[in-house]
Every structure is written in C-alpha cells, then in structure tokens.
Image (spheres, rainbow, N blue to C red):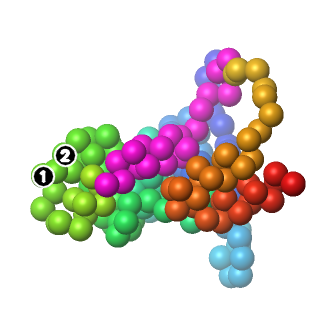
Amino acid sequence: MGGRALLLTGDRDMYQCASEDVTVLYVRTGGKSGGAEEVGPAEVRERYGIDPELVPDFIALRGDPSDGLPGAKGVGPKTAAELLREHGSLEAILDNAIRERRPALRGALIEGKEDLLIFKDIATLRDAKVKRPKDRATDWHGAAEAARARGMKKLAERLEANAD
C-alpha cells in the first residue's frame, strides 16, 4: 500500500481524483495549447475555486457540454463555485434553494433539483472494485429518451445511433 499515482487524461472530470497521492496529468488538445499540465488539489482550487471532491457537484451545477450535461439554467462556473463555497455540496445548495435571493437562480435550483442530483451522480467516479450486477441488453432507445427528457440532445442522438 502507499505510493503515488499519475493519472493521464484529457477529461477534466478526472480532476475529482486529484489528491496528495494522485496527480492528474491533463493533456490539453488543439492549437497552441497542446501539451500536458500537472493538476493537483491546488490547481483544481485555482482553476475552479473548489476542492477536488466537489468537482462532480460543480459539473452538475455548471454543466458539461462534452458529456451532454446542461447543468442548472443560468449557472456558470463562477456561480457554481460561489454556491459550493457557501454551502459545501450540491445537496446543501438544493436544501437551501428556497432562501436564494436571486429569483432566477432560486427557480433554476428548485425546478432542476432532480436532474441536478442525477447530473452529479453521472459525474461521480465509482470504485472499479464494486460488485456489478449481471449484464443485460442495453436499452439504447430508453436511454436516448431519458437523455432527451433531460435536455441532452447530442447524447440522445449518439445513443440512438448505437441502437441500430
């Protein structure tokens, strides 16, 4: 046991893994910004204004177009980080949404509560050692319908393409 890990990825969702024992080596793509950047807890805080363990909450609030997650209506990275620093988690934000002074934000949080919790669940990495249920046939059409109902049109289209 012990040691350190270096996690090579081009997916910022993996920032949730950054810790004293895990460094994310984030591979930037495209144009002049190509290359790799070491990301630890301090870099996550500098970039997002939150600790690594709150990255799934942040993604749920802000959204993630690359994963087809729309986030809370009208919430960008600054507001997501501000809310998380104030409340400490997505669940606490939603529990206190009725007290939010900004009417549009209050409405987005209250109306989007169920979806935001689902988005957090989607963005949260799982332990690969968890006992998994037996495989069954994938319901591509059902998955596409669920994605479309949550405003994830691109994801729905990709799922439908797999159904054929």
Name the one closer to the observer, 89 or 18. Answer: 89
- Residue at 70 percent of width and 20 percent of height: 133
- Residue at 53 percent of width and 56 percent of height: 149
Name the one closer to the observer, 152 or 163. Answer: 163
Q: How many marks?
A: 2
- Residue at 65 percent of width and 76 percent of height: 33
- Residue at 17 percent of width and 66 percent of height: 102
SS for tag 2?
loop
Q: Is residue 98 above or below residue 75?
A: above
Position of the N terminus by quadrant: top right
| 19 part of magenta stretch | no
Query: Callout 1 environment at 10 Å: few (<14), some (14 to 19), or many (20+)?
Result: few
Side of 42 where 135 appears, left or right: right
Q: Which residue is mark 1?
A: 99
Q: The disc labelled 2 sits on which kind of residue?
A: Asn
Q: The disc labelled 1 sits on which kind of residue?
A: Arg
The answer to whether the residue labelled 2 contacts the one labelled 1, judged by CB atoms less than 8 Å apart, is: yes
Task: Give the magenta range.
Answer: 111-131
Q: Which residue is mark 2?
A: 96
- Specify the quadrant of the image occupied by residue 89: top left
Q: CA distance from mark 2 to mark 1?
A: 6 Å
Q: Which mark is residue 48?
A: none
Side of 148 where 95 appears, left or right: left
